[in-house]
Image: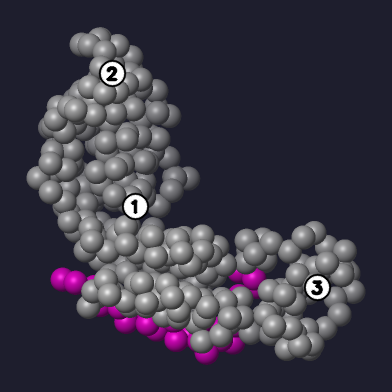
Amino acid sequence: MKIKPLTKEQIILSVDRLTRFKETETKYLRVFKEIITNNLIEPKFKKSELDEMDYKKIADLAEQIINFSLKETNNNFLINQRLIDYENSIFNLDSNVQKLLENKINYSAIIKLLGKDIPNNLKFLKSLELANPEQERIEHCFCFPLKKLVICEGITEETLLPEFAKQYGYDFDQNGVYVISAGGKNQVVKYFYKYVDCIKIPIFVLLDKDAQENLNEIKPKLRKIDKIHILKSGEFEDLLPNSLISKTLKYATQNISMGTVENIENYSSKVEFLEEFFKHRGLHEFKKADFAQLVKENINSEEDISEEINEIIKEIKGTKVPL
């Protein structure tokens, strides 16, 4: 074999992609095939040949390229086994996909390349050489190993739910709760259908009030461990207490004459009010993602949590994790 070694950055990027929350088969095949295509000079395989290749051979080729690039031997495969155990704890995997996991990549050498300013999944990878990775998650709050999946419609929920939960006393990262913003109610259904048949951990689905049709699409496939919550009114922004919105707008406008939020109830939704507020104060265009970040910076007490947000967090916390 003739190999073009992976750079340090390429190795870190590869293991980052291998340890993210994504279907095992999809992420392993994508990463391994890219490594073989870009770094195996001889023999050279066409994409069509890789698509037809046995999974074990794909894993073996990628393993050889990665380990050659590391230039360090290793006889301790504890991390490898723990990665196998973890992927199997999250997903229902067939014997073919197991071949991708059953590799001897030198993770002990790889974690030496990782610094401190790394994403949570790589912090999790580093923890796998320690006595109790789950205890490490609880102590250092890096979310992995995952225990629950929350699928919501938009970026506001993804940004604010974890912050509200902290004030409530239930840290998502500490308890392995992973939040996905699907990008709309129809996408929530697609994500749910994508994961419900292959995932072992509970799924909590959060939908806006106008998603009744989507609720009906999801209900038939709900498992006993899953839970769905449809908002009692409007969208997630409508659950924000007026006092929190007022505090956030004061923080955002500072020296600009803020006006009042007393007339907020005159609008059909709080988003409509905010769009008008930003427009008439000469501010930049109202964007949910930006406003969610501003709200996040101003959540600092239990009083900032509305009754329904409280209810949602209780339901997520109460979702039972299978043994």
Q: Earlier in the sequence, mark 2 or mark 3?
A: 2
Q: Earlier in the sequence, mark 1 or mark 2?
A: 1
Q: Which residue in the structure is indicated by mark 1?
A: 21
What's the residue at 51%, 87% (across, down)? 232
Place residue 223 in its image quadrant. Answer: bottom left
Q: Which residues are magenta?
A: 295-323
Foreground disc of the pair 1, 2? 2
Way the structure is coloured: one colour
Q: Which residue in the structure is indicated by mark 2?
A: 46
What's the residue at 32%, 34% (across, down)? 31
Foreground disc of the pair 3, 1? 3
User: Total of numbered circles in the picture?
Assistant: 3
Return the mark for residue 277: 3
Q: Is residue 121 left or right of residue 85?
A: right
What's the residue at 12%, 49% (across, down)? 94
What's the CA distance linking mark 2 and mark 3?
57 Å
